[in-house]
Image (spheres, rainbow, N blue to C red):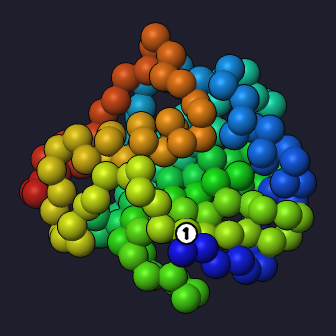
Amino acid sequence: MSQAMQTSGGLRDFRIAESLVGDTRHFVNDSVTWEASPPAKRVCVLQVQGAPVGTRVMMVVLEHKLSEPKVSFIHPDGWVRRLCLNTKHEDLGGTHKHHIINGDIESAYTPTDIPQVPLSRYVSAGVHREIMEAFLNECNIRLGPNYRWSDPYPKGGSHE
């Protein structure tokens, strides 16, 4: 099921958005590092090589909502694709993806290519990697030879 709505912060030129997603020459080539950010979340940003300068993929994981990460493919002028896991907003419930379909209109739909993550305070080690890499694949962003993963909360959130 897909739902169209007014976009908030999305890249207004959908032709650029579609060309970014359709270009298979893009890749990420960084080691994943996580920065602490208030309130109680960790953020990683990966620069997308072969795309306009400033194009990046960002994942946000809240310490007390580990099963609700958000991932975005971002052009300097706005987001291109977004993924929300186990998150309800607007008229959407649960896991869904957003993409620009025309100018200031976006569409959101329930994905079939993202690993299912039970809504929980804790998650298994590696689940955020599976989510990130599935999202990168959907955006046609390859993994470069220097790409290395690290979990945002290495013990699955059970850290003390």
Rendered view: 73 above or below 87: above
Residue shown at 85% from the left, 64% from the top? 102
| Residue at position x 71%, y 77% in the image | 4
- The residue at the far front in this view is 1
Look at the image and tell me whether residue 43 can be seen.
no
Q: Quadrant of residue 33?
A: top left
Q: Residue at horizontal 89%, vertical 64%?
A: 103
Would you identify the image quadrant in which residue 76 lies? top right
Residue 28 lies left or right of residue 114; in this view the side is right
- Mark 1 highlights which residue? 109
Judge left or right: residue 90 versus residue 123. right
Q: Judge whether 42 appears above or below 108 on screen.
A: above
The residue at the point 46 percent across, 60 percent down is 111
Residue 150 x/y as whole percent: 30, 33
Name the residue furthest top. Answer: 145
Q: Is residue 123 above or below residue 88?
A: above
Of the 4 image quadrants, the one containing the N terminus is bottom right
Horizontal side of 58 relative to 35 (left or right) equals: right
130 in relation to 92, above or below? above
Query: Considering the numbered disc 1 on the image, is that residue within a helix, a strand or a loop?
Result: strand
Of 142 and 55, nearer the camera is: 142
| Residue at far bottom of view | 91
Residue sitting nearer the eye, 51 or 100: 100
- Residue in front for this viewpoint, 154 or 49: 49
Q: Quadrant of the C terminus?
A: bottom left
Judging depth in this view, the residue of 30 and 141 nearest the camera is 141
Q: Look at label 1 and name its amino acid.
A: Tyr
Residue density around tag 1, few if under 14, some if 14–19, many if 20 or more, within 10 Å: some
* Res 148 → quadrant: top left
Q: Position of residue 94 (x, y in %)?
A: 39, 76
Counting from the top left corner in percent of width and height, residue 60 is at 45, 56
